[in-house]
Image (spheres, rainbow, N blue to C red):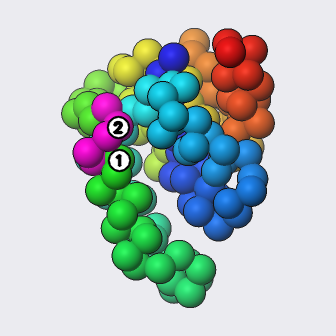
Amino acid sequence: MRAVLDVNVIVSALLSRGGTPASLLRSWVEGEFELVVSPGLLNELTRVFSYAKLLDRIRPDEARSIVELFEGSATVIEDPSEPPPVRSPDPGDDYLIALASRAQAVLVTGDEHLLGVEAGLPIVSAAAFREMLNRRS
């Protein structure tokens, strides 16, 4: 199974090591699913890690390490040039829908506005994706 993790899920994983998003990162490292990223997603992640409100909670070396881990171990595909099959209420998230669609992947997000989008592909919360993985094993 392939998945695109929204930046908010990745940040949540680093902020709460015992939470569901963190368990998803561990599951990926253990080979339970294929993580798909793109240069645009990695750039957004790097930008978010530089926010002042995160600098005191996620060390810069830790942020760099997670980006490097994704670059070296996740499936990196080109940013989609085609528009998403449907638009998000937040145009800034359209690239996530396009990326998940192109990769034929589940989009895992904590954004309520994305969770309500009917995109012809699964858009689920971290908890729902955890359940999907549990059912597969």
Q: Is residue 72 magenta?
A: yes
Asked which secondary structure carries label 1, the reply is helix
Q: Which residues are magenta?
A: 71-75
Q: Give the main secondary structure of the magenta stretch.
A: helix
Seen in the picture, residue 23 relative to 51 is either above or below; the reply is above
Q: Is residue 97 visible?
A: no
Q: Is residue 91 left or right of residue 136?
A: left
Q: Which residue is mark 2?
A: 74
Q: Residues within 10 Å of mark 2 (few under 14, many from 20)?
A: some
Q: Quadrant of residue 16?
A: bottom right
Q: Quadrant of residue 54?
A: bottom right
Give the CA distance from mark 1 to mark 2: 5 Å
Seen in the picture, residue 29 relative to 21 is either above or below; the reply is above
Taking the spot 48% from the left edge, 39% from the top edge, the residue there is 29
Q: Amino acid at mark 1?
A: Phe
Q: Amino acid at mark 2?
A: Ala
Taking the spot 57% from the left edge, 16% from the top edge, the residue there is 121
Q: Quadrant of residue 130?
A: top right
Q: Position of residue 44 (x, y in %)?
A: 39, 58
Q: Are marks 1 and 2 in contact (CB under 8 Å)?
A: yes
Q: Is residue 46 left or right of residue 87?
A: left
Q: Position of residue 27 (x, y in %)?
A: 58, 36
What is the number of callouts on the image?
2
Taking the spot 57% from the left edge, 12% from the top edge, the residue there is 120
Q: Position of residue 116 (x, y in %)?
A: 73, 31
Q: Specify the label residue 70 is tagged with.
A: 1
Q: Is residue 113 magenta?
A: no
Viewer-proximal residue, 89 or 14? 14
Q: Is residue 73 left or right of residue 59?
A: left
Seen in the picture, residue 39 relative to 127 is either above or below; the reply is below
Q: Residues within 10 Å of mark 1 (few under 14, many from 20)?
A: some
